[in-house]
Image (spheres, rainbow, N blue to C red):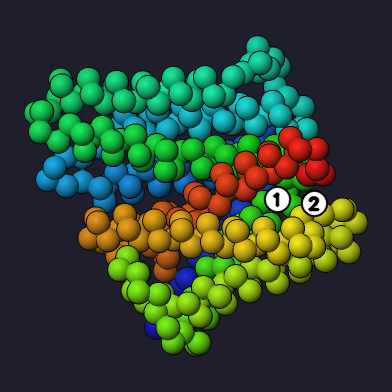
Amino acid sequence: MKNETLTRVISALFLLAYFIFAVQYTGLYFLPLYLFGYLFLYLGIKEFYTISKTEEGRAFSGFGQLIAFIIYNMFYVKFLLIQTKTPKPDILSSFVGLELDVFFFALIMLTVLGSLLLQIIKRPADGAIFSVSTTLFGILYIALPLGHFLLLMGYTNSLYYIWLVCGITMWTDTGGYFGGRFFGRHPTGLKISPKKTYEGYVTGVICAILYVFALNFVWEQFFHEKTPVVGIEGVLFSIFISLVTVVGDLAESAVKRDAKVKDSASVIPGHGGVLDRIDSLVFTIPVSYYYIKFKSLLGFFI
């Protein structure tokens, strides 16, 4: 048990160290960040397609990964165009007016039509619905959130928002785990995750709120910058993102339970697979991005 805990801690520290480097380093057009995101994209979608195989059918893995790669790079180009930390590559000048929504929906249509065509050519008619829908779901579940992570990095206060969202997500999960372990008395009764308790969820939310106040204090004291999410907004935002974190965790639990697996993979020592680590972030990142986007449209400081 001690060796397992030590392995989890070492793996977490290694990932955290590289993550800090990736989000801080702006040289070479954010190449460390791009590679970090692509690694999670490749492993995450591979894990999803692997555990989703059934007798009813299976995803078109190679085709899905290709579309996911194109979508990820499309978001990366958009990120390079909107960020202000480093000069934009001259080669991207023709993409200044890039309509992200148009390209994205075109790729979604290509995924559906391409999957159906591959089903007709390479497989029997049985399982067509499952194969096509699983291929599409894997792309939406993994590539879209990672793309929004890049868009979140494009904001002026991007580092603050990254630590805000990722911190709330992490402390909700951590607080929920230890709160349930030490104080848990009343199970939630959810079939997907029967060991979860109300005490664990409440502890997770409290930890998230305390984290936001601590982050704002450190940010203002050491970086001397105004923080965009403060006071009652900070409390409400913490609660909201904590609830989204729980939904993300339960969603992946539902996927794994349906696939009859404990972990999505064993690629990260002591933690399982990539999906086991980003299960909540695939929900909290896009939700936070659109919250901030809506806030900016209303004219508030972001």
Which residue appears at 50% of the width and 65% of the height?
Answer: 11
Circle 1 sits in a helix, a strand or a loop, which is it? Answer: helix
Q: x, y (%) of residue 241?
A: 59, 58
Nearer the N terminus, badge 1 or badge 2? Answer: 1
In the picture shown, does residue 36 fall above or below 81? below
Q: How many labels does the image show?
A: 2
Mark 2 residue element:
loop
Disc ID at residue 65: none
| Residue 130 percent location from the top left of the image | 21, 38
Q: Quadrant of the N terminus?
A: bottom left
Q: Is residue 168 left or right of residue 256?
A: right
Q: Which amino acid lies under the numbered mark 1 shown in the image of this protein?
A: Tyr
Residue 243 appears in the picture as rendered: yes
Residue at the (57%, 31%) spot, across then down: 75
| Residue picked out by circle 2 | 228
- Residue 139 picture location, percent across and down: 39, 37
Q: Are marks 1 and 2 in contact (CB under 8 Å)?
A: yes
Dot 1: few (<14), some (14–19), or many (≥20) neighbours within 10 Å? many
Judge by depth and name the residue closer to the eye, 301 or 83.
301
Residue 49 against residue 218 in the figure, above or below? above
Residue type beneath disc 2: Pro
- Looking at the image, is mark 1 or mark 2 nearer the viewer? 2
Instruction: Judge left or right: residue 8 versus residue 260.
Output: right
Q: How crowded is mark 2: few (under 14 residues within 10 Å), some or many (20 or more)?
A: some
| Snapshot quadrant of residue 98 | top right
Image-quadrant location for residue 207: bottom right
Residue at 34% across, 44% down? 46
How far separated are the C-alphas under marks 1 and 2? 9 Å
Whether residue 265 appears in this view of the structure is: no
Residue 38 is left or right of residue 190, and the answer is: right
Q: What residue sits right under mark 1 in the picture?
A: 161
Q: Quadrant of residue 29?
A: top right
